[in-house]
Structures are given as C-alpha cells and as structure tokens.
Amino acid sequence: MSFDGIFTMAMATHLDKQLRQGKVHKIYQPSSFELIFHIYANGKKHQLYINVKGNDARMHLTQLQRENPSVPYPFTMALRKHLTNSRIRTISQYKSERIIEITFDTFDEMGYEIEKKLVIEIMGRHSNVSLINSSNNQIIHVLKPLSIDTNSARPMLPSLPYEYPPVQDKIPFKDFMSAKDYPFFNDGKKLSGEVGGISLKLANLIYDLYLTKTQTGFITKTSNSFASFAQKFIKETCCAIEEGSAMSYLERSNGNLSDFHIVSPSTNLDGIITLEPCDSPSTCCETYFEGITSSNLITLRSNKLNSQLKSLLKKSQRKELAIQKDLEKAEKSKEFRIFGELLTTYMYKINTGSKCIELENYYDNSMIKIQLDPKLSPSENAQRYFSLFNKGKRTLIKAKSQLKDVQQQIEYLKTLLASLELARSIDDIKAIEEEALTEGLIKNKHQKKITTNKKDSYKPHKYMLDSGLVVYVGRNNIENHRLSLKEGKKTDLWFHTKDIHGSHAVLSIPPGYTPSEEDLKQSAAIAAFHSQGRFSNNVPVDYTYLRYVKKPSGAKPGMVIFTNNKTIWIDPALPDNVNNSDK
C-alpha cells in the first residue's frame, strides 16, 4: 500500500497540523535525493524529512540525525536563499495525487511579502521536489532537473512554468467518495484500476473485507454492492483522516515489516491483516522505511562478506585436499628407505645397466621388485632411493604442519560464517568484518588502518535471568575471546554448544553465589539460541568454570580448549522476562 493517494492525504493532514505557522530555521541536504528542514512550530523543534529515491520516496517528520556534506548542493543553496526564516502557511495534498504542497510566506529582496511553494511528488523513481514562485507558477529550482531531451512532455527546469504530472484516466478517490454513478467493480484489481489514489494492495484488502462481510451476513451481495462498500470504506477512512482519528499501522509478516497504511478505526480488519498501531503517520513511515533500509543493508553487507568468507573456505578446503595428497605421497616414500637398504645389501647381485631387480625383503621375507635407472651404478641407485626417502620425510614434516594450519583456518572460517549467520544488526556485521580485516582474511582498499579491541566496539549481547544473574554472549570471535579470556572472572561459568558452531556465553556469578539448576538451564538455552542449533530441539551445551577455559598457543581468536565440563541438553530460548532488543 505504502504511499498511495490515501496515505498521502493522511501525511499531508498530519504535517499541516504539526507544522502550520512553523518557522523554517535550517535546511540541509544529506545526499542528492534527501532534504531535511528544521522547523520550529507549536513550541517544538521538528525535522521534516523528504526522500525522492525510487522505492524509498517519502515525506515525514523524523527523529534521526543524518550527516551532511561539507559542501552544500546547489538545490540546498537555493532553498536556503528563498525559504530560510519563512513561515509555513499550509501543507496540503494536490487533488487525490501523491503530491504534497507546502505553501510558505516569505519576503523578496525588496522586503515585500510573497508566497512560494514547495511541491513534493512522491511517485517512485519519478519522485521530485520543485521550488515554485506562486505568483507566476514559475520554477525557481528543482531537485532533479529534467531537460527537454530527457522528458519532452514535461521538462522540469528553472524559469519554466511548473506543470503537474499528467493524470491517469481514473476517478480520483476524493470524487469517488461522493459519486452516485460508478463503474462496476467485481474485485480489488478493478477497484484499483478505476479509482485513483488507491493501491492494489489496499483495494484487495477492501475486497477481502467485503467478502468477509458478505459471508457473515452483514452485507447482502448484489451486482454492484462491492462498489458501494468500497465507497463507504474510503469515505470513512478519509473522514477519520480529516478528523485526526485515523489509525496508522505497520504490517508484519513472519516478524518482518511488510507494509504500512492508514485505515479507519471503525473498520474491523480482524482476520485480514495484523495491525501494529503507530502514534502518527510519520512514526509509522519512518519505522517502516528505516527497518526496511536496515534489513536490506544487513542483507547486502552480510551477503558480500558471506561470499568472501565462503570463497576463502573453498580455497582452504582445496588446499587441504592438495596437502593430504602430498601426505599420501610422502607416506609412500617410506618404502624408498627399504629399497635403498636392500640395494646396498644385495649390491653384488645387481648388474650395471639393469632396469629392474627382484630381491628378498628381509623385513618380512617377501620378494620385492625394485625399479632401477640403467644409467646409474648400483651404488648410485641405492643413494637415489635414500635421497627420495629423505625428501619425502621432509615433505611429510612440512605437510603435517601445513595441514594443521589449514585445518585451523577452515575451522576458524566456519566460526566466522556461523557468527555471520547469527548476526542481527549492522553493528554485528561490522564487528565480524573488522575481525576478518584484522586477521588479514579480507582487504578493504578504503581502510588505511585497522584498530582492534576498542572499548566502544565491545558490545556483547546481555540477558538477565529470572534470578537476576546476567549472561553475556559474544557477537563474534574477537568478543568471544575477550569475554571468555579477559573480561570474565575465573569463577564465572562458560557455556558453548557441543560440536556445534556458536558464540561463547558467560554467566556472571557474584562472590559467594551458587547458581541454581534453573540458572544453568536458562544460560544453556541462551548459548544454544546463539548457535547454529538455534532452530533445533534438545541441543547439547557444554559448560564449565572459566578457570578451565584456555586458548591454545597460536590459535585464532575465539578458539579455546576446556576441561572439567558437563553437558546440558536443552531447547534454544531466551529468557521470557528479558526486556532486550536482542530478543
């Protein structure tokens, strides 16, 4: 549904109530597609946010602080010149369109009061913002200029007259509210196609609600009763918007934000959608878009890092296979020592120029065939096999060391991928990125210096148990290392899933306190929740005191060994009483 005509009406009404007669103090442009107005109205400071970037296009009040460029954009300079210290006369929707107009009372160079207008078109990739001189309808400046070559039907350039976007061949929803003759609507798609300002999703919702009402007997289904029902629904919603009693809501699907809109509080939507009320259209809009932006950013950043780490893992696994093949060859070289010894012992039996000889192996009394180089003497053939044996022995020692290193690397990369899989915020992703950069696994050409163990970057998850004890959980290997080996006390309890990749969890125990069985179960459930066994049942979790947790010499961060441990089998869960964003 998002920013269709009806939500635009609600936003314009909401903004007009909050900002009318407000004074414009400052104007910023954080990026080429964003604007922020600092406005003092009704005894409060407000920030009006405008975004014209494709699917993110919107307009609402914001509480978030955004960074501004050191050098302002030309459009920013134009807005500051014409609108700083001006007062907002009205904020209104243009007809039934996704267009909001802000009328300003300001002064010209001679000190005469004049009216200027900011027109915000919220139309996906065609969104734009235009500053207009109301007296002659002339464009003063435009955020996204459109030349005649770009758009011959509607160029958008300074000094040209402003023209509204061409209207579609639909009945505006404001006219539809009072229409007595209307087309035949037999489904939501037809309603959206005939009435302007109504998104297809809202139209389908109205149709689903209509079907529910007819099935329960509240409405008698006739040939065009749906059109009458839709008209009543839209009229009630718009009246509620005008009265300020309309409810804005967020829609969630499987815990994720999926949409937002305005509906009339008198409309029963039980069974159709799940509503999450917001205190205003601005709050609703900002919560949705920031949530979606954050989710998309997490996905994009996580996917990129995931791809890099998986590529390194595959490379390490190929290296492991190559080393194992070298080991197999090196193991076979042990028989070269026997060949050399046999050739030395039975040298008198070997004829110069022979290509092969069969000799008795006095180690197991078997007959063994040995290949010879006819160009070499019997003594030289024996020395050749001794050399091959020594070479194989050196290869064996080196390959075993390399195999150990590459297997540790593989295990470490798996822990990073596990941490990435469990990451739930952009900060979690950044922490894992920093760890990978610090360990030299990935490179960032824009990063000049890597700093580690920053105090402010150490933010493990924190949970309070029913008993009041606190459990800390590392978000990545760096935090796991610090939590288990530096920050925790030797008397604290350490938890980790058995043979399953996951985070370190530490139960902080006050002096003289003995954890109860329930403390242990809740702590183990938290550790299981922060592991790859999160969606499994009856997950094994090892626990022991921190005094028994050690880091092997040369091991990667977060890689530990432990003793004196016990195991709890538990279902992953977080404490019910946790008031925590991690839940």
Image (spheres, helix red, strand yellow):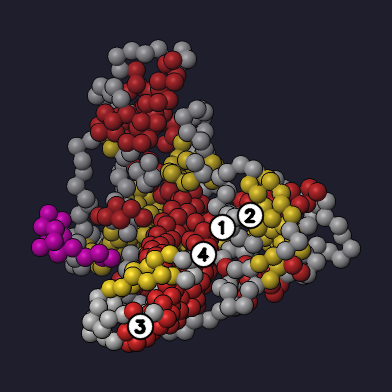
Amino acid found under the numbered disc labelled 2: Thr
User: In the image, which disc is placed on residue 411?
Assistant: 4
Which of pointers 4 and 3 indicates the residue nearer the eye? 3
Reading the image, the residue beneath label 3 is 348
Please tell me whether residue 165 belongs to the stretch shown in magenta.
Answer: no
Q: Secondary structure at mark 1?
A: loop
- Point out the tag, 4 or 1, that comes first from the N-terminus: 4
Q: Are the residues at dot 2 and dot 4 in contact (C-beta closer than 8 Å)?
A: no
Residue 180 visible, this angle: no
- Point out the tag, 3 or 2, that comes first from the N-terminus: 3
Q: Are the residues at dot 1 and dot 2 in contact (C-beta closer than 8 Å)?
A: yes
Rendering coords of residue 121 (x, y %): 30, 54
Q: Is residue 93 left or right of residue 439?
A: left
- Point out the tag, 2 or 4, that comes first from the N-terminus: 4
557 or 133, which lies in front?
A: 557
Q: CA distance from mark 3 to mark 1?
A: 62 Å
Which of pointers 4 and 1 indicates the residue nearer the eye? 4
